[in-house]
Image: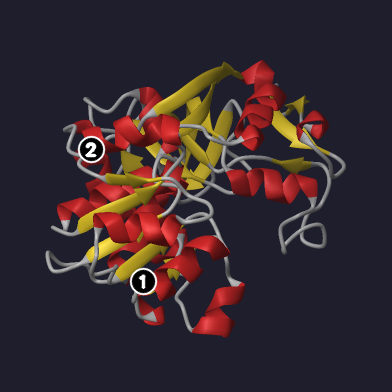
Amino acid sequence: MSRRITYSQLGGPEVLTISEISEPHAGEGEVRVRVKFAAINPFDAKVFSGEATSSPQNVSFPSGNGNDFAGVVDEIGDGVSTWAIGDEVLGGKGFSAQADYVVVVANALVRKPDALSWQQAGALDIVGRTAWASVESVSLTAADTVLVSAAAGGVGVIAAQLAKLKGAKVIGSASESNHEFLRSLGIHPVTYGQGMVERILEISPEGVTAALDNNGRETVDAALALGAPADRINTIADYAALDEYGTTGVGAAGATADDLATLAVLVAAGTVQVPIDSVFPFEQVSQAYTKLLEGHSRGKIVLEL
């Protein structure tokens, strides 16, 4: 038997429970990973609470939970020659990652660089691919000034650093407690909320040329007011803006496993920082999501199995 986080009704973090299930096994073209760390994401909570557009009609009970994981290959299916028992890997599989074992298609995995911590590896899939794809979607250069919202959060902190690697001037919205951290990354911090446009103009009198929205309509409206063209505003938090303003909405699906592998190398080298806000034991999954929903986390929250 093995353990898996499941839920059988919609609600808050209290609906999550540890279930005993039969061990899954790798089929043809698949590998099984013994999970060491699994991350939690805001989207998970939107699904198990019923807030996501895909919920509840596309959720069958009992449902698994979580996408991001890192661990060790411990079983290989027929036809797989790219992995060996004992390989250290990271990846993602929807509604499945928070479990002792995850079975995935072989080409969906990424090799974990030796210098990449297990916690970071387990947290990287969704936020890493989303940040990578969102930055690429607006074609940044050294001529750009880009606004990144929620710049100390899971997606935002990676996107802001990737934007800086493109040569762009990066302005990141965050709570005051995260400003010094953002400065240490070479990002110009700004407090969100009323008056944000004026505060950004103090940093960049010419406004901004692009924006990466990880927070919602406030960022989109601010970016438009500051001169960013709608088609250079990518949002993962306000999809209504796509129809209303013509913004883009490129997310994790816009990045490949190769992109994730490249990012993993950058993180392992220290070129991109992926802060781990906190680590919870697997048994404290509900407490982990409670902390996530309180907001203002710096980076990622992960579960240790």
Contact flag, marks 2 and 1 (Cβ < 8 Å) = no
Above or below — where is 139 with respect to 51? below
Checking the image for residue 226, the label placed there is 1
Above or below — where is 170 with respect to 210? above
Q: Residue at x 77, y 61 (%)?
A: 58
Q: Secondary structure at mark 2?
A: loop
Amino acid identity at mark 1 = Leu
Left or right: 103 as drawn, with respect to 273: right
Label 2 crowd (10 A; few <14 / some 14-19 / many >=20): some
According to the picture, the residue beneath numbered tag 2 turns out to be: 185
262 or 140: nearer the eye?
A: 140
Q: Residue at x 48, y 26 (%)?
A: 37
- Measured in 3D between alpha carbons, the distance from the residue under mark 2 to the one under mark 1, in whole angstroms, is 23 Å
**How far from the left and from the top, in percent, is residue 22?**
72, 29
Q: Secondary structure at mark 1?
A: loop
Q: Residue at x 48, y 45 (%)?
A: 92
67 or 169: nearer the eye?
A: 169
Left or right: 240 as drawn, with respect to 250: right
